[in-house]
Image: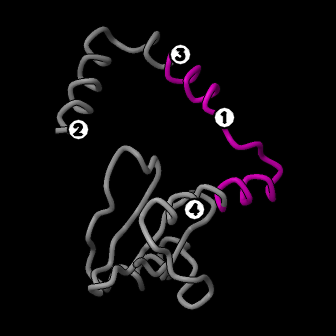
Amino acid sequence: MFTLIAAAFEDGGALLRDENGIVLHLRPPFYADPPVEVPVEAVGIAITKYGYWATEGRFPDFADLESVKTFLNEKVVEACMARGLAPITDEQALQNSHELFSRAPPEYPAQVLSQNSNRAR
């Protein structure tokens, strides 16, 4: 069970509390990295310094991390649309990646792939 305690819906960042009271920071891309445990003081800092909104009690608790990620993805899209921006599609993200790699030094793609394979282990 996760409680959403603070969020920056414009970019998908969120602070959650799990059933043990541990505060976790979750940022997109959600599939790349797991949530990171942060001290409870991070909540106040995120709200006062980084533009997060206090959300505790405004949304029902989430049964699992996947439902939190789905909710945050929906909120990011809503925030983009409210600002008149179209959210990036998977095809656009893939095109951007191809463009980035085509301009990168030859060793860069190998470094990125190496880093990502190390994370998967």
Q: Which residue is mark 1?
A: 89
Give amino acid for label 1: Thr
Query: Which is nearer the N-term, disc 1 or disc 4?
Result: 4
Q: Mark 1–mark 3 contact, CB under 8 Å?
A: no
Secondary structure at badge 1 equals loop
Please name the amino acid that badge 2 sits on: Ala
Q: Quadrant of the C terminus?
A: top left
Callout 4: SS: helix
Q: CA distance from mark 4 to mark 3?
A: 27 Å
Q: Name the residue that disc number 3 marks.
A: 99
Q: Residues within 10 Å of mark 1 (few under 14, many from 20)?
A: few
- Residue indicated by mark 2: 120
Left or right: residue 72 compared with residue 82:
left
The magenta segment is 75-99
Judge whether 107 appears above or below 52 on screen.
above
Sequence-first tag of 3 and 2: 3
The residue shown at (42%, 68%) is: 64
Q: Where does residue 30 sit, x and y in percent of width and height?
A: 43, 51
Gap in angstroms between the C-alphas marked 1 and 2:
24 Å
Earlier in the chain: of badge 2 and badge 4, it is 4
Q: Residue at x 70, y 43 (%)?
A: 87
Graded by Cα atoms within 10 Å as few (under 14), some (14 to 19) or many (20 or more), the crowding at tag 2 reads few
Point out the tag, 4 or 3, that comes first from the N-terminus.
4
The x and y percentages for residue 15 are 43, 74
Read off the residue under disc 4.
Answer: 72
